[in-house]
Image: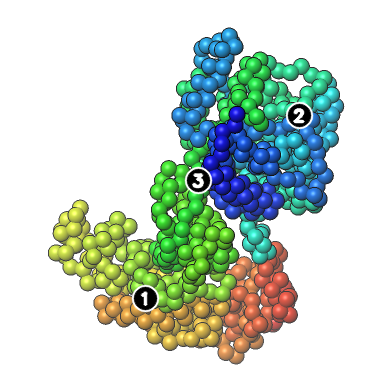
């Protein structure tokens, strides 16, 4: 007699099947997952449980009866000689303990012992399963797992994986050996791949497993080769012409001896304490591994015991995957706000409906920058996948467009800094937007003060990082100008500061008031203005007022100043908050000797000509060449533009030379320069 199926259960089962099939299609066929694995697992489990309770629901077309995706039509199908099964999961320590209990009970019942069981423990690699068929020691076929019975032939692709031996290292190899294991992509290779994808304007991969699956199922093995996959063996399928080892541990050693890569992070343990110890150790090591793992796998070590335990449906009773807490979860974006970092970089941050990720409640996740938001098409109100890996800041991995509500809002980078109201700049060729109020913005205060007081800037002795933190945190100093308004009493009252150190600091500030224009310009902390540019600017303009009055075109006239630097200076000087702080600094008595603007040798042979130097010249170093050009009335710029008259190229000249050629700018070598100089 079959249990009657309530209508509600039948409806739910149908709904689950449809949903799982949809996710499977996106995952297996399109390589574009729509939900985190943990959620898929939950749906799948719910369906499994429903079908277990009401067996009449378990139709042949249920995803629980299939496991995996259909092979793609364009890769040849391969029927596995020995089916490739899957593992049941333990999602908590309690479930791992229950697994061990089941194993012991079954062994005791079969009179095969009642003590602690010996297990082989391995990592659970987050890649995809593969079967490598070796005949007489030669790799003849590689196939994906597919649905466990029929997979796809990916032999040419697998041959590109360096860690897969094409020939086994054995004088008398087995007639047939099917090595089984996982193909995966190391995280750094995924980063490289995604950089290339970005550069080409193509879709990035959300995680190494999708990237590995995409790479392995390419029709063109050349593409697979570029993507650098790895392989770890963890078992075998068909075996002929060799003695089967007695234990899984011995099997792994044997596979390794044949030249197959077997992961080193493995152990033989006894009893459940051993299992949990291995689990905790793997969890600890996880962030340091160069590849992703999503748990550990426990296998009864002795093959005789494995055979006695056998299988339930498509999974062994003798093994289990003990999964780590999920690092991904879905939640809703309540808002997108902007955070200002200490260098002025504006980072969009998603405010999220609180969600548990890997055991921690996450309410914020970084969206990196505006381009990332556009590329991932994340909108306020969207459901998104968030990931928290190791110690890194949680990030939004992807939006789930199929769960997009009717009314979402697009994010726009603000034109004004949300912290100080200064203008926001975003140079055309940079991804990062920045606040231009470097001297004024509270978010940048400590960093700006550190730079200002630094040895190569105003060199305020005794004003180190700790003291700056103290002064800012106490609300005594907001801008560099405030430093010069500090008095003895205020300073002496600070914690860990006596009269004597307070007096020393005041003396140091007094000394720092007397400075040079180049130090002062450098101290302002203008982006792209290092010491040498500050020196050039000071010499070229002679006075601060002349520098502040210069527009971009006038700035480009200064030696070594190209369009990027000129734009950055112009934006800094245009920000009223910055000008205000500069005025306050002058009012506080910060002074320097000003001179006349540097005279150009107006009549020299190179008057009015702009040069760009690149590569190594045979006899002159960069400074020598620059000095000679400037002495002859020419100007040396940092980057090539249409206004460049000559590019002087030495050996190993790079992108500047390419740009010159592209723009049709004259390219000369050192001899050519000497001729222009009349030498
Ligand atoms: S043993 C009979 N060992 O997990 C079970 N699998 O659901 C054979 N996996 O498809 C698998 N690391 O892709 C085994 N050390 C490991 C593994 C591992 C990852 C994957 C494999 C398999 C899935 C099991």
Looking at the rendered structure, which numbered label has been put on residue 466? none
The quarter of the rendering in which ligand 1 is drawn is top right
Secondary structure of residue under mark 1:
loop
Judging by the rendered image, the residue that carries numbered circle 3 is 327
Q: Residue at x 52, y 54 (%)?
A: 385
Q: Residues within 10 Å of mark 2 (few under 14, many from 20)?
A: some
Say which quarter of the image contains residue 451: bottom left
Secondary structure of residue under mark 3:
loop
Q: CA distance from mark 3 to mark 2?
A: 33 Å
279 left or right of 165 in image = left
Q: Residues within 10 Å of mark 3 (few under 14, many from 20)?
A: many
Q: With respect to residue 171, does 464 lie above or below?
A: below
Q: Residues within 10 Å of mark 1 (few under 14, many from 20)?
A: some
Please provide percent x and percent y for residue 620: 64, 68
- Find out whether the residues at labels 1 and 3 contact each other: C-beta distance under 8 Å: no
Looking at the rendered structure, which numbered label has been put on residue 82? 2
Q: With respect to residue 386, does 611 lie above or below?
A: below
Give the label, 1 or 2, closer to the camera.
Answer: 2
- Find out whether the residues at labels 1 and 2 contact each other: C-beta distance under 8 Å: no
Looking at the rendered structure, which numbered label has been put on residue 421? 1
Q: With respect to residue 436, does 121 lie above or below?
A: above
Secondary structure of residue under mark 2:
loop
617 left or right of 361 in image = right
Please provide percent x and percent y for residue 628: 61, 77
Asked if residue 58 shows in the view, the reply is: yes
Q: CA distance from mark 1 to mark 2?
A: 67 Å
């Amino acid at each position: 007699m079959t249990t009657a199926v309530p209508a509600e259960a039948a409806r739910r089962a149908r709904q689950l099947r449809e949903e799982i099939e949809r996710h499977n299609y996106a995952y297996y066929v399109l390589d574009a997952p729509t939900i985190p694995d943990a959620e898929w697992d939950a749906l799948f489990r719910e369906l499994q449980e429903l079908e277990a309770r009401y067996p009449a629901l378990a139709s042949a077309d249920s995803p629980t009866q299939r496991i995996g995706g259909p092979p793609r039509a364009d890769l040849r199908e391969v029927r596995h000689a020995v089916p490739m099964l899957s593992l049941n999961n333990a999602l908590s320590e309690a479930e791992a303990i229950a697994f061990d209990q089941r194993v012991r009970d079954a062994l005791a019942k079969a009179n095969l012992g009642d003590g602690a069981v010996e297990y082989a423990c391995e990592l659970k690699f987050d890649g995809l399963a593969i079967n490598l068929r070796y005949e007489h020691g030669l790799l003849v076929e590689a196939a994906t797992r597919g649905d466990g019975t029929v997979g796809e032939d990916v032999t040419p692709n697998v041959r590109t994986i360096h860690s897969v031996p094409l020939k086994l290292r054995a004088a008398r190899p087995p007639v047939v050996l099917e090595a089984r294991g996982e193909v995966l992509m190391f995280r750094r290779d995924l980063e490289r791949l995604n950089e290339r994808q970005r550069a080409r304007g193509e879709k990035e991969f959300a995680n190494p497993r999708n990237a590995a699956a995409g790479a392995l199922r390419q029709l063109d093995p050349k593409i697979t080769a570029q993507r650098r996959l790895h392989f770890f063996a963890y078992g075998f399928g068909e075996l002929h012409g060799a003695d089967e080892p007695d234990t899984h541990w011995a099997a792994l050693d044997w596979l390794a001896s044949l030249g197959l890569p077997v992961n080193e992070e493995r152990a033989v343990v006894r009893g459940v304490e051993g299992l949990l110890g291995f689990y905790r150790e793997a969890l600890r090591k996880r962030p340091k591994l160069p590849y992703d793992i999503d748990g550990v796998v426990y296998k009864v070590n002795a093959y005789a015991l494995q055979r006695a335990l056998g299988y339930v449906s498509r999974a062994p009773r003798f093994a289990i995957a003990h999964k780590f807490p999920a690092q991904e979860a879905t939640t809703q974006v309540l808002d997108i706000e902007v955070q200002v970092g200490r260098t002025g970089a504006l980072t969009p941050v998603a405010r999220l409906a609180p969600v548990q990720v890997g055991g921690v409640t996450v309410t914020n996740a970084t969206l990196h920058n505006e381009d990332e938001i556009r590329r991932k098409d994340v909108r306020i109100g969207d459901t998104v996948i968030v990931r928290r890996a190791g110690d890194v800041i949680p990030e939004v991995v992807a939006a789930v467009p199929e769960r997009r509500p009717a009314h979402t809002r697009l994010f726009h980078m603000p034109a004004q800094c949300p912290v100080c109201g200064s203008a926001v700049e975003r140079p055309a060729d940079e991804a990062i937007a920045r606040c231009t109020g470097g001297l004024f913005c509270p978010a940048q205060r400590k960093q700006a003060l550190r730079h200002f007081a630094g040895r190569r800037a105003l060199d305020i002795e005794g004003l180190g990082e700790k003291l700056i933190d103290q002064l800012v945190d106490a609300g005594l100093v907001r801008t560099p100008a405030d430093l010069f308004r500090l008095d003895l009493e205020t300073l002496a009252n600070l914690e860990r500061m006596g009269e004597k150190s307070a007096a020393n600091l005041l003396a140091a500030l007094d000394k720092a008031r007397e400075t040079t224009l180049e130090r002062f310009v450098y101290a302002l902390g203008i982006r792209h203005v290092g010491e040498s540019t500050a020196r050039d600017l000071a010499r070229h303009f002679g006075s601060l007022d002349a520098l502040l009055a210069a527009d971009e075109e006038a700035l480009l006239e200064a030696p070594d100043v190209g369009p990027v630097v000129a734009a950055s200076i112009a934006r800094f000087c245009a920000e009223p908050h910055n000008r205000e702080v500069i005025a306050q600094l002058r009012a506080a008595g910060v002074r320097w000797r000003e001179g006349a603007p540097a005279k150009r040798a107006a009549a020299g042979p190179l008057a009015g000509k702009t040069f760009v130097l690149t590569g190594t010249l045979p006899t002159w170093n960069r400074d020598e060449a620059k000095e000679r050009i400037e002495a002859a009335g020419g100007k040396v710029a940092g980057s090539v533009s249409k206004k460049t008259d000559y590019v002087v190229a030495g050996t190993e000249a790079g992108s500047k030379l390419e740009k010159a050629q592209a723009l049709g700018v004259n390219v000369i070598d050192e001899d050519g320069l000497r001729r222009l100089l009349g030498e």
